[in-house]
Amino acid sequence: MTRKLQARGNAGREVAAVLLRAAIGGTMIAHGVKHGRSLAGTAGWFSSIGFRRPRLQARASAVVEVGAGALMVMGAATPLASAAVVGTMGVAGRAVHASNGFFITAEGWEYVANLAVGAVALAGIGPGRFSVDRATGADRRLSGAQAAAVAGGLGAAAAAGQLAMFHRPAVPAPEGEAPPEKS
C-alpha cells in the first residue's frame, strides 16, 4: 500500500471513530437523560414490561446510559463503554423488541441491533486519535479483535445476567383460557 493510500485509510478511520462515538454516545446520553427526567414514569414502564424492582431499573438505566454515552463520546474506556451499550441494547432487544420482528416501525429489534453492532465495531477500530484512551495509552492494551470481543462478550453476559435476575415477563394465557389472576 502506498503511503498516500495508507494516510487516507488512517484519516478515514479517525473520522469513522469520531462519528461512531458521537452518534452512539450521544444517543445513549439522550436516552439516559430522558429516563432520568421521568424516573417514576420509567419505573412504571419497566414494571409494565415485567421487570422486578422497577425503580432500581429506572435509576440504573439512566446512570448506565448517560455514563456509557459520556465515556463513549470522550473515547474513554471504549471497550467497557461499548459493552455497556451492548448490554443495554441486549436487554431492550429481548425484553421489548424481539417479539415484534425486525423493523423499528413495528417496535422491532432493528434499532437496538444497529446500536449494539456499532458499539462493537467502535471497540474494534478503537476510539481514534482524539480520545482519552489514546491520550492515556489505554487504546494499546487490547488488539482490535480483543476489544471487540470484550465489548460483545461482556455486554451479552451483562444482558443475560440482568434479564435472568430481574425480567419476569407475563406469560400469555393459552388460547381460549382466561389469564391467571395476580395474587
Image (cartoon, grey):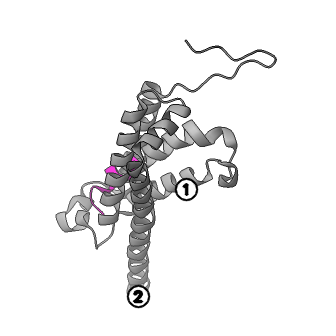
The kind of residue tagged 1 is: Asn
Query: What secondary structure is the stretch in magenta mostly built from?
Result: helix
Residue 26, image x and y in percent?
A: 41, 63
Q: Quadrant of residue 1?
A: bottom left
In this view, which residue lies farthest toward the top?
183
Say which mark, if any, is on residue 114. 1
| Residue sitting at x 58%, y 40% | 96
Q: Is residue 114 visible?
A: yes
Magenta-drawn segment = 75-84
Real-space Cα separation, disc 1 to disc 2, in angstroms:
32 Å
Residue 45, image x and y in percent?
A: 51, 39
- The front one of 23 and 123 is 23
Instruction: Locate residue 17 relative to residue 171 in the image: left or right.
Output: left
Say which mark, if any, is on residue 37. none
Residue 182, image x and y in percent?
A: 58, 15
In this view, which residue lies farthest toward the bottom?
4
